[in-house]
C-alpha cells in the first residue's frame, strides 16, 4: 500500500509537524477514527483514519479510486509511519452521519431537501458504478452530512463514506468469506446465494431504495419490528417488502419500488435514478397527519390565567417551560403551570383527563385558559423537585433500602399506567418528582411519576409518526431500531426502569456518560453494550436491573414481577451490607 500511496498523488504529512491526533471518535477491530487538527498549512476540519493491514487490504484502495468527487468523502493525504498502518487524512463532516442526524433532528428536512440529498447520493453512486465498484453497504449511517440549509436547496451537502464492504466487480475480494452481509439493506439475490457474481450496480440500487426508505422513516432501521436478522432474511426471500413511509411523495415511493424489483436487470441504473430525481415532483399527495390524534383543547376551562391563578416565576423543567404558579382566590395545594410546545397527544391527554387519581402519579388539575391561546397545564408542585437533581447535587443521599422503597412506588405507578393500556416512554430519574424525602427512613419517602409527553399505546405494532426526539440513553434497543416509531410496550418501559434504577444507584450519573453524543450512545447500545454495576448496588438489586435489559423484550421482567422481586429483598441484609 505504501507504494500505491506514493503513486496516488496524495500529499504526505507527518504527525507532530503537520497534523495532531485528537479524541477517538470511532473504533473497531483494525480501524480507528480520530478527530484531527492541522498544526500548519491549513485549518479545514479533518479526521485521522488508522487501518491495519487487513482493513487496508479490504478498504483503502477504494478511497483512492473514487477520490475527488463532490459527493464522496475526500481523502486529503496520508501519514507515513513505521507501524505498518495505513493512515489517511480525510474530510470531517460537522453534522455526523445521516442516520444520527435524522434521529436527533426529526423534523428538520422537507421532501425537497430529502430529494436533493438522494440526488447527491445517486450521483456519487453513479461515479462509483462507473469505476466497476460495488459499495456493498449503502445506508444512512454511511452518508455523511456536511451542510444543512433549509433555505437554499443546493447548499445542502452529503457524501458517501465507508468502503469496508466494497468490491471490484472484476476481482473477487480478499477474505470474501469474512465479509459481513448487511441483511436488512442488501438485495435478495445476495441473501439467496451470496456469490461474488450477485454483487453489481443493481444490488447497490436495491440498497439505495432501502436508504431512501430509511431516511424518510426518520432513520428507522428496516424491518425494525423484527428482532432477529435471520427472520428478516426469510421475509426478504419471501418477497416481503417494506411499507410506504408516512412522510413520502408518490414519486419517491414509486422510485423505491423500482429499486426493489425482484429481477436485478429490471431495476434502474444510478444514471437513470439521477435523471428521475432531477425532474421529480416531490410534493406529498397524501394526508401526512400523525397516526396519533391530538387532544382538542376545550373551549371552556376550569381555570383561567389571571382569574384563578398567576404565574410569575419560571423554574427548570424537564419538559416544556414550567412556571411556579400561585392561586389568586383559592387556597389549595401548591401548583405549577407547564407551558407545552404542542397540543398533547391523545395518550398524554388521557393521563391528564381520564386517569383515576393515583398516589404515585403527579396530580394534574386541568388545562388553563389564557388570552394567548397557549397550551397551559396545571399540576401540583413537588416541594423537593425531581429525583435526578436531588441525587446529583447531594441534597438527597438515600440508603439502598430507601431507594428500593422509591422504586416500588414508581413500579406501582407503572403497573397502573400499563393497566390503562399505555406506556410512559421516558422513564428516568428526571421524571420522578419528590414530595417527601428521608435518606434513612424508607417510610418517610414519597415520589410521583410525571411527564407523559412520550406516552404511547401499549402495542409493539402501533405506529407513531410524530417524530419525537427519543431519550437515547434510557430507551430500549428496539426503540432505537424503530427511531421511536414502533416497538413501545411494557417491556420497553421495563428496560428504561432498569436504567432509572442504575441512575439512582449511581447518584444521578448520566448513563453512558463517557459518550458525549447520542450517536456514540446509540452505537454502543446497538452493539449490545450494557451499563456496568454501580458501586453501591447490592447483588440482589443488580440481578433485577440486568433482567430488565435482555435484548429480547419478551424475556424482560414485567412490572408486577419487578414489584414482587423488590418486595422480597431483605432490608436487614441490605442494611448489614451497607455498613460493611
Image (cartoon, rainbow, N blue to C red):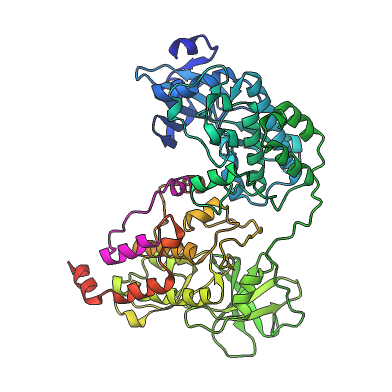
Give, as a single range, the part of the protein colored magenta. 523-548
- Residue at 48% in and 83% down: 359
Left or right of 489 in this view: 345: right
User: Closest to the observer: 184 or 247?
Assistant: 184
Q: Give x and y (percent) for residue 516.
A: 46, 47
Residue 547 is a magenta residue: yes
Residue that sits furthest to the left in the current view: 580
Give how far across and how far down residue 4 sits, in percent.
48, 11
405 on left or right of 496: left
Residue 423, by quadrant, is bottom right
Residue at (61% x, 62% y) in the render:
462
Using the image, determine if residue 511 lies above or below residue 312. Answer: above
At a point 35% along the width and 60% down the height, the residue shown is 546
- Report how many numbered discs are placed on residues in the image: 0
| Image spot of residue 281 (x, y percent) | 82, 41
- Does the stretch in magenta take in 317? no
Q: Say which quarter of the image contains residue 212.
A: top right
Q: Between 429 and 411, which is closer to the camera in this rendering?
A: 411
Q: Nearer the viewer, residue 190 or 369?
A: 190
Q: Is residue 90 left or right of residue 57?
A: right
Q: Is residue 87 visible to us here? A: no
Work out which quarter of the rendered image holds the N terminus and state it.
Answer: top left
- Residue 45 on image: x %, y %: 55, 30
Q: Is residue 236 visible?
A: yes
Q: Where is 420 relative to 14, above or below?
A: below
93 up-or-down from 166: above or below: below
Residue depicted at 28% across the width and 63% down the height: 536
Q: Is residue 202 left or right of residue 576?
A: right
Q: Closer to the camera, 481 or 86?
A: 481
Amino acid at each position: 500500500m505504501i507504494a500505491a500511496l506514493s503513486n496516488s498523488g496524495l500529499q504526505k504529512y507527518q504527525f507532530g509537524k503537520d497534523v495532531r491526533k485528537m479524541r477517538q471518535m470511532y473504533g473497531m477491530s483494525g480501524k480507528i477514527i480520530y478527530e484531527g487538527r492541522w498544526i500548519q498549512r491549513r485549518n479545514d476540519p479533518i479526521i485521522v483514519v488508522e487501518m491495519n493491514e487487513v482493513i487496508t487490504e479490504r478498504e483503502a484502495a477504494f478511497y483512492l479510486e473514487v477520490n475527488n468527487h463532490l459527493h464522496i468523502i475526500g481523502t486529503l493525504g496520508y501519514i507515513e509511519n513505521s507501524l505498518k498502518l495505513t493512515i489517511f487524512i480525510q474530510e470531517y463532516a460537522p453534522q455526523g452521519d445521516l442516520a444520527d442526524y435524522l434521529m436527533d433532528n426529526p423534523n428538520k428536512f422537507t421532501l425537497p431537501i430529502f430529494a436533493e440529498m438522494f440526488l447527491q447520493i445517486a450521483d456519487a453512486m453513479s461515479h462509483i458504478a462507473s469505476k466497476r465498484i460495488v459499495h456493498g453497504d449503502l445506508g444512512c449511517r454511511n452518508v455523511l452530512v456536511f451542510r444543512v440549509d433549509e433555505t437554499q436547496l443546493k447548499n445542502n451537502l452529503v457524501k458517501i463514506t465507508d468502503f469496508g464492504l466494497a468490491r471490484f466487480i472484476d476481482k473477487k475480494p480478499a477474505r470474501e468469506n469474512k465479509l459481513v452481509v448487511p441483511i436488512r439493506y442488501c438485495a435478495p439475490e445476495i441473501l439467496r446465494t451470496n456469490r461474488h457474481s450477485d454483487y453489481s450496480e443493481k444490488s447497490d440500487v436495491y440498497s439505495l431504495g432501502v436508504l431512501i426508505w430509511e431516511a424518510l422513516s426518520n432513520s428507522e432501521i428496516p424491518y425494525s419490528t423484527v428482532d432477529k436478522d435471520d427472520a428478516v432474511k426469510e421475509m426478504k426471500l419471501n418477497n416481503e417488502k417494506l411499507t410506504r413511509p408516512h412522510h413520502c411523495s408518490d414519486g419517491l415511493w414509486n422510485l423505491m419500488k423500482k429499486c426493489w424489483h425482484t429481477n436485478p436487470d429490471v431495476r434502474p441504473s444510478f444514471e437513470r435514478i439521477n435523471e428521475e430525481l432531477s425532474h421529480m415532483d416531490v410534493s406529498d399527495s397524501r394526508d401526512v397527519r400523525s397516526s396519533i390524534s391530538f387532544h382538542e383543547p376545550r373551549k371552556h376551562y376550569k381555570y383561567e390565567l389571571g382569574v384563578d391563578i398567576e404565574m410569575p416565576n419560571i423554574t427548570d423543567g424537564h419538559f416544556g417551560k414550567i412556571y411556579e404558579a400561585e392561586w389568586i382566590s383559592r387556597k389549595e395545594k401548591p401548583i405549577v403551570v407547564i407551558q407545552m410546545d404542542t397540543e398533547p397527544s391523545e395518550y398524554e391527554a388521557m393521563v391528564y383527563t381520564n386517569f383515576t387519581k393515583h398516589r404515585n402519579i403527579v396530580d394534574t388539575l386541568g388545562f388553563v385558559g389564557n388570552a394567548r391561546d397557549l397550551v397551559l397545564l396545571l399540576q401540583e408542585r413537588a416541594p423537593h423537585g425531581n429525583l435526578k437533581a436531588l441525587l446529583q447535587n447531594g441534597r438527597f443521599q438515600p440508603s439502598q433500602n430507601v431507594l428500593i422503597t422509591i422504586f416500588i412506588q414508581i413500579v406501582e405507578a407503572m403497573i397502573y399506567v400499563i393497566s390503562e393500556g399505555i406506556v410512559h416512554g421516558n422513564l428516568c430519574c428526571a421524571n420522578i418528582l419528590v414530595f417527601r424525602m428521608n435518606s434513612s427512613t424508607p417510610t418517610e419517602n414519597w415520589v410521583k411519576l410525571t411527564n407523559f409527553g412520550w406516552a404511547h399505546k401499549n402495542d409493539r405494532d402501533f405506529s407513531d409518526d410524530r417524530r419525537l426526539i427519543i431519550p437515547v440513553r434510557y430507551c430500549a434497543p428496539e426503540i432505537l431500531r424503530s427511531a421511536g416509531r414502533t416497538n413501545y410496550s411494557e417491556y420497553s418501559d421495563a428496560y428504561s426502569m432498569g436504567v432509572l434504577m442504575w441512575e439512582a444507584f449511581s447518584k444521578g450519573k448520566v448513563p453512558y456518560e463517557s459518550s458525549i453524543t447520542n450517536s456514540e450512545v446509540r452505537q454502543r447500545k446497538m452493539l449490545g453494550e450494557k451499563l456496568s454495576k454501580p458501586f453501591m448496588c447490592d447483588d440482589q438489586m443488580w440481578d433485577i436491573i440486568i433482567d430488565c435489559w435482555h435484548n429480547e423484550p419478551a424475556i424482560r421482567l414485567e412490572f408486577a414481577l419487578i414489584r414482587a422481586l423488590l418486595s422480597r429483598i431483605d432490608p436487614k441484609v441490605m442494611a448489614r451490607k451497607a455498613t460493611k
